[in-house]
Image (tube, grey):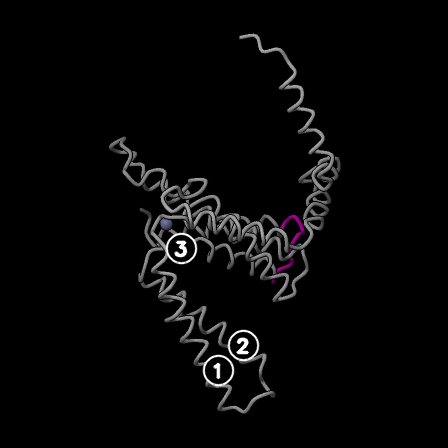
Amino acid sequence: MANFTTHLYGGAAVASLSSLGVYSLGLADTRQAQLYFVLGAIGGLLPDIDSDSSTPVRGFFALLGVALAFGVSFALVGQIPLLALSLVWLSVFCFVRFGVFEVFTRFTVHRGVWHSWLAVFFVAAAITNLAYWFIETPALEAWLSGLFVAIGYLTHLCLDEAASVDLLNSRVKRSFGTALKPFSTASLPSSGLMLVALLVLIHFAPSFDPVLVAANETGLISEEFGIWIRDPSRWLADLRGFGGSMLSSDWAW
Ligand SMILES: [Zn+2]
């Protein structure tokens, strides 16, 4: 299993190259490129939040607690007295740092659902929605934020898999295949729950059009492909036609 430092460097390296990429394509200004880099690096550490009570996990929940406590009390400034405000801050912080942390560690298994492709999509969709609805960033920036966290996240899973192959002794450790799996068969209820949450997030996600337009303008995809993917009825018809031809053709074995 790759360690914390490997994940920090790995995630940061891939995130910096990717953010340079979007910057040079003109899809991000300097501030956005820096933000994407930080998001990618954080994404590279995120999957191990399932490894109970490790220092980074405690640190993550402490940071999340501070951020949420700040957010909630900031929204209440001027509406309640200062003393009550500090009590709100403290309650939110303790709730996240100890309450949510406790529940989370009890219900997660290391290398369970958080080390899977499903989690990559879930995290990307969650960050996109969070950025769009709560921080009110434009759709393109929200999607790119989600994409960068996903890039870092995926780097982490690849590093975990790479670490399970011992190249010098040409043998494969038991952990092989536990990081880059489609979903977790060991914890099916968690996988099901994450899938439902992902579908809800996709339902509420902002329009994907700005991403396709930007990708088309920078020459990453052709205009026809953009139109094709934006209009589901077309590719559903294509798919149905393909399925139909598969069924009707005579199979000569
Ligand atoms: Zn890991």
Please rate how many residues cluster around mark 3, counting C-alpha atoms within 10 Å: few if below 14, some from 14 to 19, many from 20: some
Residue sitting at x 62%, y 11%: 250
Q: Are marks 2 and 3 in contact (CB under 8 Å)?
A: no
Residue type for callout 3: Leu
Q: Main secondary structure of the magenta part?
A: loop
Rendering coords of residue 81 (x, y %): 54, 91
Q: Is residue 80 above or below residue 159?
A: below
Residue beneath label 1, please? 88
N-terminal-most mark, 1 or 3: 3
Q: Which residues are magenta?
A: 24-31
Residue type for callout 1: Val
- CA distance separating discs 1 and 2: 8 Å
Rendering coords of residue 42 (x, y %): 46, 58
N-terminal-most mark, 1 or 2: 2
Residue at the outermost left position: 169
N-terminal-most mark, 2 or 3: 3
Residue beneath label 3, please? 8
- CA distance separating discs 2 and 3: 30 Å
Residue beneath label 2, please? 72
**Direction from residue 212 to residue 147 in the image, left or right:** left
Residue sitting at x 71%, y 51%: 210
Q: Is residue 16 among the parts visible in the rendering?
A: no
Mark number, residue 24: none
- Mark 2 falls on what kind of element? helix
- Mark 3 falls on what kind of element? helix
Closer to the camera: disc 1 or disc 3? Answer: 1
